[in-house]
Image: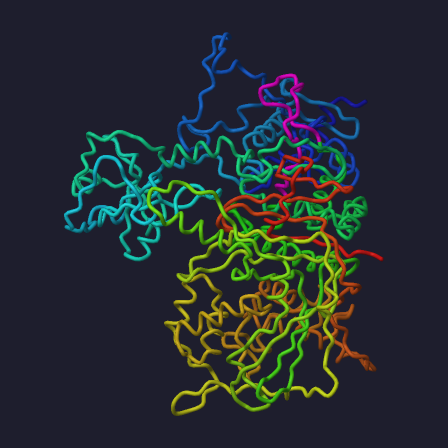
Amino acid sequence: MADVGEVLMSVLSTIRVPRPGDRVHKDECALSFSSPESEGGLYVCMNSFLGFGSQYVDRHHARTGQRAYLHFTRTRKAQKEDDNNSSSGDPPKKKPTRLAIGIEGGFDVEQDQYEEDVKVVIFPDRQQVTSEDLATMPDVVKERVSLSMAGFMSADSVSHALQVQQWDGEVRQESRHAVDLKQLDNGLKIPPSGWRCEVCDLQENLWMNLTDGKVFCGRRYFDGTGGNNHALLHFQQTGFPLAVKLGTITPDGADVYSYDEDDMVLNPKLPEHLSHFGIDMMTMQKTEHTMTELEIAVNQRVGEWEVIQESGTSLRPLSGSGLTGMKNLGNSCYLNSVMQVLFTVPDFQTKYVSNIQKIFDEAPSDPTQDFKTQVAKLGYGLLSGEYSKPAPDPGDDNGTAEPRGDQVGIAPRMFKALIGRGHAEFSTNRQQDAQEFLLHFINMVERNCRSGANPSEAFRFLVEERIVCQQSHKAKYTQRVDYILQLPVPMDQATNTEELQEAERRREEADSGPTPTVRAKIPFSACMAALSEPEVLSDFWSSAVQAKTTATKTTRFASFPDHLVIQIKKFTFGLDWVPKKLDVSIDVPDTLDLGDLRATGQQPGEELLPETAPPPLMTPDVEVKAPVLDDSTVSQLCEMGFPLEACRKAVYYTGNTGIDAAMNWVMGHMDDPDFSAPLVLPGCSSAPGTTPTESLSEEHLATIVSMGFSRDQASKALRATSNVLDRAVDWIFSHLDDLESMEVSEGGRSAAESEGSREPPPGPRVRDGPGKYELFAFISHMGTSTMCGHYVCHIKKDHQWVIFNDQKVCASEKPPKDLGYLYFYRRVTE
């Protein structure tokens, strides 16, 4: 064997020193979930800084010829004595007193719990070089390798670079309203105790508005506790911005919240503002938890979630193949739940897990940025059982404690970073809607499966919409592709109306105290009836009568998918347009027969509406090609969070008749597949702001054509998205049904360009079969909004329901099938 110094000298040119901006993967293997804490540690290439577990480092060496790797290991430090038994003489571990990470008084960071070791390993003989060995080597070797090792140790890993390493949640800014706050001289004086909400008589979580002295309850928490949002509603009605939490006032200060700035703030004039309403800060004592104390308490018990369904039951932990937990990376439970379910679908297992070796062999030089590689890695991690091991109790040094349900599991950091890259929401650590993420992931699968098997076909189905003009009785048929059946919730069909009315009466009565939660019980059959019954269109432009009239729209299945996803539309808007969640219980069945909802197409003797576009908008004196839109109405809709193009269409199609009509149009068309697509005017080749053909980027056209689309299709997508490549790719995959007339061919040429092509262009590829299904999984959401709360999923495995709650995987005793948000059915084979 050659001298290790000579070997190092021979590979010195391949050893790099990490520079700012380099992606250093020192926490996770690019092809598995091995980490420095895993058996065998992690090998990091000293040239590309990619990390590999012991089972994949030889593969990388063979493919690249790279020989120098840093072998990085972490071992957990021995636990010190606890608070009550500090016989070692060391001070007991301090509990967090600040809502912060990585600073004095905050939560401990993970690095403090581990001892780290790094050494150079030379392949293929795996010769090891420690820091002590370097000291005896030539200066040129010692300097380069030492700098590389030091740079590696000091560099932020990619996963940690995506997270906040030092954060102080208690740093508050002075409110811009504090100094000049106007206070009403209404003679109101607040007593030192005995406060109640002026609306619901709640006696805790109370906030006094500093403008008028009114006392209202705070926001409702994700588990239904807290307040009833009356302080927030008061701000929305009055615009009075600042409120102080009663019970937190002491001579040192108090919790002050600015509804206008949507944050906890500092108020330097708080003593003066409180004195206005008869409150002397110097005599007040704390009787309520501050918001910081409440948040610290929640963060200390993350993962337990007392409100989770079945939390009162002793659940039996499970482990093994297909029973692997996933770590919560910070509000990533929506991703965990969706991916757990998807990898129970055979199409995804076959596409990504059965072919994993082929996918790895064909992976690019940086597999961390390859979609197929990272999805295959995640699928194997979930199904193999290699990471389905009970997590040791943190207080048990020997790892011999009884399992608590938590697993070591997998942390999908690379997957989340790749899937969310460039997305305004999924690239953040905020909570997201599981349904939106499911569609986002399916969209990415579509992009990356232009050739070969496409597992998203398991969910794809055709919807037929039949619109009948009530004046001419002529019909129009359209088809569109969909992946999720959205089921309305008819609240007026509740079967426990009297119970709901009694619960509401008790809440309104004074001194009644807390009342048990009463949910509206909605029959599943009522939801299906609401879906299938004809919808009345009161503002339909009929090409038969050349005028606006009334029509009915009926929706049916033109095909039945292998796997059907049903979304219960629990999230809606109140009369004040504030998003809210319907607290309902629906008796979702284990089996479905949707045969009666099969579309039948044009009926015998039925006449079709003429294919004539509606006329453009008219001004009082002249017809114009471009729409004259009420900018103020468009702006109001945009401020509510709706896409600009959807707002423009709402104003256009309601004829500039005002915000109410436009809002009604928005609410009635939110589920349209082209809801946010650009407004295209009748008789115009493109929408305002789109790009004419002659100015399209040839580079963008070539990129889209290389994905298997025709030049015509690429041009249409770029014109519809102002020649922005990323938007064009998203547009083309969300408008596949609009491109039916443009056949996609291997060479990137449309059917019209192919000589002798006389076959009709194919429609979207869909599977079809009987409409009989059985329930195999459902995802539940807890909280008042999709933007907060928690997701878990239940999956039926070998006739046993299993609950997947991030790292907890247990046998389910009472699966709450009536409280789900997304339901997954598979076709029943005869």
Query: Foreground: 496 or 30?
Result: 496
Q: Is residue 600 left or right of residue 277?
A: right
Residue in view at x 58 percent, y 88 percent? 543
- Say which quarter of the image contains residue 409: top right
**In this picture, is 57 found above or below 276?**
above
Regarding residue 693, the answer to whether it shows in the image is: yes
Q: Identify the image quadrant of residue 251.
A: top left
Q: Is residue 43 left or right of residue 536?
A: right
Quarter holding the C terminus is bottom right
> Which quadrant of the figure contains the N terminus?
top right
Estimate the x, y position of residue 720 in percent, counting from the top left. Answer: 57, 72
Which image quadrant is residue 170 in? top left
Examine the structure image and report whether residue 391 is included in the region drawn in magenta.
yes
Question: Residue 353 at x, y = what percent?
Answer: 78, 45
Q: Residue at x 71, y 33 (%)?
A: 318
Q: Is residue 791 magenta?
A: no
Q: Tell me if residue 294 comes above or below residue 439 in the rendering.
A: above
Residue range in magenta is 389-414
